Every structure is written in structure tokens, then in C-alpha cells.
Image (tube, rainbow, N blue to C red):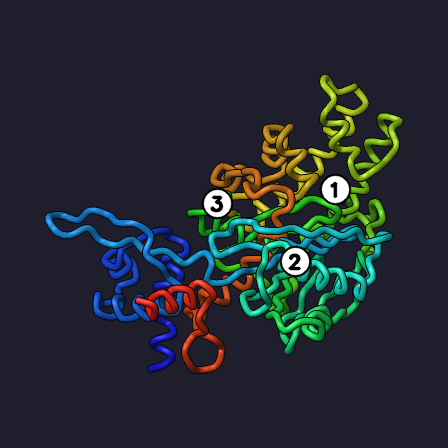
Amino acid sequence: MRDVRRANRASLLTDLFHGGRQSRQQLGDTTALSQASVSNLIGEMIDEGLVEEAGLVGSDGGRPRSLLRVAPDFGYVAGADVTETRVLVELYDLAMSRLAVAQYALPGRTPDPCLAAEKLLEGLDAVMAEAGVTRPEVLGLGVGVAGVVDQSGDAPVVHSQPTGWNAVPLGAMLRDGTDVAIHVENGAQAVGQAEMWFGAGRGAGQVVVVLVGDGVGAAVVRDGRGHRGAHSDAGEWGHTTLVYDGEPCRCGARGCLEAYLGADRVAARLAGATGLEAGSDLLTRVLADEPLTDAAAQALRQTVGYLGAGIGGLINLFSPERIVLGGRAGLALGERFLTEIREAAARHALRHPYSRTRIDLCQLGPDAVAMGAATLPIARLLADGGLPAATGPAPLSRAAHRRALARDRT
């Protein structure tokens, strides 16, 4: 019976989170639960502070019905992005409003895992302090990283050949430093979930989210679920071969897509064509020029060609409804050359699957990994119906405590 109750709460909470404000009757219709079950379970969640009334809607001939929503201040979630050069930590409420941000530089091109973990914990403390949030109010910290994340053990382990992270027990390292629940995921997978929930993937069942930045990766989403492969290592699109025995890649192979599309390789190509100094902002600076010089235009056409070829391969392999292009370099190129990227993909994809695939830009911005990582503890909350892992009542949030005190006073 506890499992049934948890499942029914999860159904209601998930529908309310993704569907927005709804009445009890609407929730009964969309979840196929009886009105009695809906009323009882919603009553529980209101008492816990997890759900709150948020306005009224008219009804046919009767009293207006109360609209419900997930209470934004029931708890808070932190999301982090660990790249080769920085750690970014953000704090959100349950309405996904960003409340605080902390950012730290990482030296070198192969970040030290211990330093990254230290900065993640420092960033978590910093965003909580900035927002005035205490540890018990934080439902979890989600962390997006480059590379393969092995979820098979008690704590996530990261494998990333390009950054030299070999079986780094990042989950355990973070758990040793905080009692906040820790979730670690591949950055592209995290963005894929966020884009499916809030962005360019909404309403589609088969989507591939492509990230082009310092590294290159992809997340394949089928029927709302990320495809992780048999051993949690699917999605390393950047290390598929574009050119046989081509340019050396940081992973140790040659001819990988990342060897032609990684941010440092794009910057080097542009520097060679324009004579400008290579740097992390060179692509942005070149794209800001109007008109482009002939040399810059030629280098960018080559880059767009590589990107289109890679996307064409994804279309042939997965035949998705949508390809969503994101990442700092991906968005910078897409905002200027989306038509050319689509044309290049069409040249490298079979006509029929290409004709049924839409190529769009990520809607959540270049720093979507941190936001995507913040959805990881929310997904856990929804799946558990707002109940803790152990049996027993859900803890009251700060907002619920305030409401209980107000009731006691009256």
C-alpha cells in the first residue's frame, strides 16, 4: 500500500510540476485517479508544504475551483557545471527561478578532481549563503561533468580520457564534504533532460541534444528517457570518427569529431586564418565582425561543414524528431549559421530521415548544464512523490512551518 501511495503521489506531483497550475478535477482527469484519491493525496501534500493553492478558475455553474501548483519554496536545488576551465554552481527554487550563482576558475586544461570537488562544495556554500538558504532546505546538488558517469555503484564515478579523469569517485568525494544529496551526470545528458522539460525538446518523443563547447557530446532522449547504453556510457558523439587517421584527439584516438569541433581546435583554425591570437573568446570576436573577412568566412564554413557532417550522422543513426544544438560554440555558430548547418546536415544525411527531422537551437542558453544538473534532484523528488527514501511522513518545509504556526495562532 505504501508503494501504491508513493506511485500515486508521484503521478500527481509530476503532472502538476510539468503541466503547471491545475485544479483537483483536472489532475483527476490527467492522472486517471479518483477524485477521492486526488483530494486525499493533495491534502497531504498541502499540509507538508509541497503543494499550494495558487488562484481560482471558474466552473460551469458551480463555485470557482482552486488552482494548485508545486510550492516554489518547499525546497531548493543546486546545479553545477564542471568544465576543463571552471566550476559554475547555481541555486534554484522549485519554480526554476535562479536565486544565486558562484563561479570559480580551474587552472590548466586537465582540472584536478580534488580541486574541482573543493570548488563545488565551496560554491554550494556560497550560493546558499547568498540566497539565505540552509542545508536542510536543499533537496540536492546535481553536477554535470564531461565524460562517462558510471552510476552502477553506491556513488557516481567519472571516466573522462580527454581531461585525465580515470575512475574519479566524484560522488563519494562530494558526499564526504556535505550532507546534501549528490547527483552526478554527464553534462549533455543533464542538458537533454532540461531541454525536454523546459526548452526546445518539449512535446517531442525522440530528440538528440548536441553540445559543442570545450568538448563535444550528445544526449539521446527517447520517450522522455535518456539513452545511457548498457554501461552508462552512451552519448560520446564527440569521439566518433569523422576523418580516418585524421587530426589527433585529446582522447588518444585520431580523427574524432571533437578534434575538429572542440573549442580549442576551432580557435586554432580561426587564428591560423585571421592572424589573431587564439583564445577562448576568439570565435565570439570573429563572429561579431561585420562583414566577415574572406579568411574568417572560409574557416567558419569549414567548421560549419564539420558540424553539419556530424549532425547528419546522428540523423542517419537515430532518425530523431529534433536535433537541439547547444553549448557555447554550438550556439554561437547556430545563431549566425543555422541555415548553413542545416544545409550541411542535409548533404550528409539520407533524404528521408532528414526530411522528418527538425534542427533547432537550445533555448536554455550556453550555461544550460548547471540548470540541467539542477533538474536531477527534482527528478528524484518527483519520482518519490515528495516522500523521503525511508518510510514515514515527508518533512515540513520552511513554508509549511510558517503556515502551521499561522494556523496555531488562529
Q: Amino acid at mark 2?
A: Gly
| Left or right: 250 as drawn, with respect to 55 | right
In which quadrant of the rendered image does the N terminus lie? Answer: bottom left
User: Is disc 2 placed on a helix, strand or loop?
Assistant: strand
| Residue under pointer 2 | 144
Q: Nearer the viewer, residue 230 or 48?
A: 48
| Residue under pointer 1 | 261
Question: Residue 301 appears at what percent x and percent y?
Answer: 72, 28
Q: Amino acid at mark 3?
A: Glu
Q: Nearer the viewer, mark 3 or mark 2?
A: 2
Q: Quadrant of residue 152?
A: bottom right
The vertical placement of 200 against 391, above or below, is above
How many numbered circles does the render carry?
3
Q: Residue at x 81, y 62 (%)?
A: 115
Residue 197 shows in the view = yes
User: Is disc 1 placed on a helix, strand or loop?
Assistant: helix
Question: Residue 114 appears at what percent x and percent y?
Answer: 80, 66
Q: Residue at x 84, y 45 (%)?
A: 247
| Left or right: 218 as drawn, with respect to 65 | right
Numbered badge on residue 321: 3
Answer with mark 1 or mark 2, whichever residue precedes in sequence.
Answer: 2
Q: Residue at x 60, y 59 (%)?
A: 78
Question: Residue 381 appears at what percent x and percent y?
Answer: 48, 66
